[in-house]
Amino acid sequence: MAARLERLPFGVGQAPGRWKLWIAVLTAIAILGWYGWYLEISRGMIVTGLRDIGPMGGATWGMDVSFIVYFVGVSFAGITVAALVRLAEVKALRPIARMAEVLTVVALVLAAFAIMYDLGHPLRGIVNLFKYARPQSPFFGTFTLVISGYLFASLVYLYLGGRADAARCAEVPSRLQGFYRLWAAGYRDTPAALERHNRASFWLAIAIVPLLVVAHSTLGFVFGLQVGRPGWYSALQAPSFVLLAGVSGIGMLILVAAVVRRTVPGSDRLNEVVFRWLGNALMILLLAYLYFMVVELLTSIYTGAERERAVTEALLGGRYAPVYWSAVALLVIPLSLLLMRYFRRATGLATLVASGVMVNLSAMAKRFLIVVPSQTHGTLLPYQAGSYAPTWVEWAEMAGLIAFGALLLAVFAKLFPIMPVEGGES
Amino acid sequence: MRRRLVVWLMVAVGFGLQAVTYLFLATPIGRPTDDSFSNPRIPFAPVLFILGVVLVFLAAVVYEVLPEEKHHDR
Amino acid sequence: MTRYGMVIDLDRCTGCRACMEACKVENNTPEATFWMYVFRFEEGEYPDTRVRFMPRPCMHCDNAPCVKVCPVGARYKREDGLVATDWERCIGCRYCEVACPYGVNTFNWTHPEEQYYLDWDGGIPPWANPDLTEPYGDEQRRIAGGGRDKGVIEKCTFCVQRVEQGLNPACVHGCPLKALVFGDLDDPESEPSRLLRRKQGFRLLEEVGTEPRVHYVGGGPPTENSRQIDAVEARV
């Protein structure tokens, strides 16, 4: 049996000044984002840079949809790590399992917000989706399996995984004791309970992995099935969405883990082994994703129907070239850094964190490049080429969401142990 | 014993609900040629689908959290 | 079974765009929004240039991608062939707009008062025209372009409010050269059917598989060499 806790671990329940400052800044940015949404609701989506495809020469899906896809992509990481711990029995990754699960939940919440931002009638959207959602539409999968199913499954996984630690935290007298007791729900540290937990987690992981693949693939199908959109219509969309999700998710997880390592007292279990694992996983996913990018590029420039070629030209040398080549660089540079790190068995955190940040920036740009150029330059009928530039409202909304996500993570870390407590099961 | 029964029941009902809703109750799948292809056969059919997904995962919670039965001394 | 369709005679079209004007007046579309659009193409190099014109309404496809992707069933296909948008159910996700290969959908980006040509003090503003705000069809859904609800998608309705009264759509009615012909394509003696028999026709983007109900006769589809001139560069 584990020793009784004397204090709440990992800085839980304490609110140092630096943390409060950080929370204040994040809250301010989040409020700015919600103010942008308020403008969007009151004046209409005209406050964004989106406009109609076709004669009006705009793009109707822009930053908002790019970020929906990006956030759902980031949510890939958590459950993958959890599944690796349970199914592949990679015990070394146990210390990050909980923050990975929290990252998944937070990312899905942000995706749900981003969907609300994107709808012309958000409230009607919620009601009508629950009332009328059609399975023929790829959005059905996104709505039911991703936002509802995947989010719920992640919450269940997080909840069950935290019960043991909640029971131990409940032993320490504190203001949060009631909360921990509720979470623990009568957990008793018996061998039978442990075995039940292991079995339940195992089967949960087995159930969540196909859900994850289906969820990300459905998101890919939203784009890949549209025959009227050159640049989208491709069988590669679903698998490449899954891969880029893995890249951005692991990258974000590296960032979160590094921040935890630096700021949370007692987090030395987040050692080199964990980070090396994450770095290698990111490296492999990057290699696979770059392979997909090369295949897509070669296919579209080799012969390419006229409209496909127009989109590709806009990406490679036209209007979107700066964004495209930055996205490529932000994938190739981290890959080189990670390869060097792998072969030299280096141990520094800095390159790893830098890689994590770069691949996430690239993922944001890449999502944008998937969504927008096909609308402005890829119309099948010969309309004039269009243009799209996000307004401050869209930038504010997305920055606000990212800040809100960071806020949720920071608050969670103070309410509950961000890592499994030593000596217990996670 | 009771625990296993409840859990299996929840999983079965959950998957069953998903299958039934998807195949029979939600909007008919097929070439959209008239108005009936835009309405679900019962309103809020998607809620039932989500309920099915939720039930399956709640079964895991039930499995872990349901208190032990009092065993008779053997 | 009445199945409406349209045949456009490109030999007659002079690109005057009266149909665009008629559509706008009939349906009171807001600024920069054109449900009917007329392409003006130039082909060849000077001095051997040729100018062609091509009206493009909504195709009301039989295998419409917009109907397939609508998450809530707001975009649906009626039995009489019209592809309609129920603006009371539409949630403004704009998936139909990205899915349409022809680019016919328009979104209401802001309140109607802010995107109209004139100020309307008193009286019924054009977007509240009762003809446009009533429900139509056996299914009794609000599908004519009324309300101009902020945040929903709208498009060419084949003037359902006129068709239900036995009239032709506004573009057909307003064309001075009778280049647009509307009627029941299932009826072999209707005007469009007879026109299709007389002249060889084609449909736009047939290879995409949407099965449009708008046929073109007397000309050809735009080619790689077609450049658009006089584009309507209106933006909200």
Image: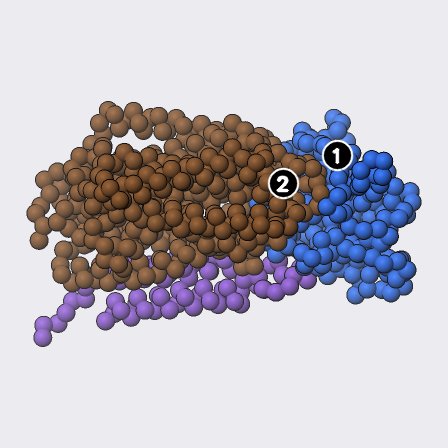
- Secondary structure beneath disc 1? loop
Answer few, some or many: residues within 10 Å of disc 1's Cα (few below 14, many 20 plus, some between 14 and 19). some
Q: Are marks 2 and 1 in contact (CB under 8 Å)?
A: no
Specify the amino acid type for callout 1: Val
- The tally of labels here is 2
Residue A227 is tagged as none
Residue identified by numbered label 2: A377
Q: Chain of mark 1?
A: C
Q: Residue at x 45, y 64 (%)?
A: B18
Whether marks 2 and 1 lie on the same chain: no
Coordinates of residue B36 in the picture (x, y in percent)? 64, 62
Q: Quadrant of the C terminus of chain C?
A: top right
Specify the amino acid type for callout 2: His
Residue C232 horizontal side relative to residue A370, left or right: right
Coordinates of residue A331 in the picture (x, y in percent)? 41, 40
**Chain C shown in which color?**
blue
Which of the pair C77/A175 is nearer the observer? Answer: C77
Answer few, some or many: residues within 10 Å of disc 2's Cα (few below 14, many 20 plus, some between 14 and 19). many
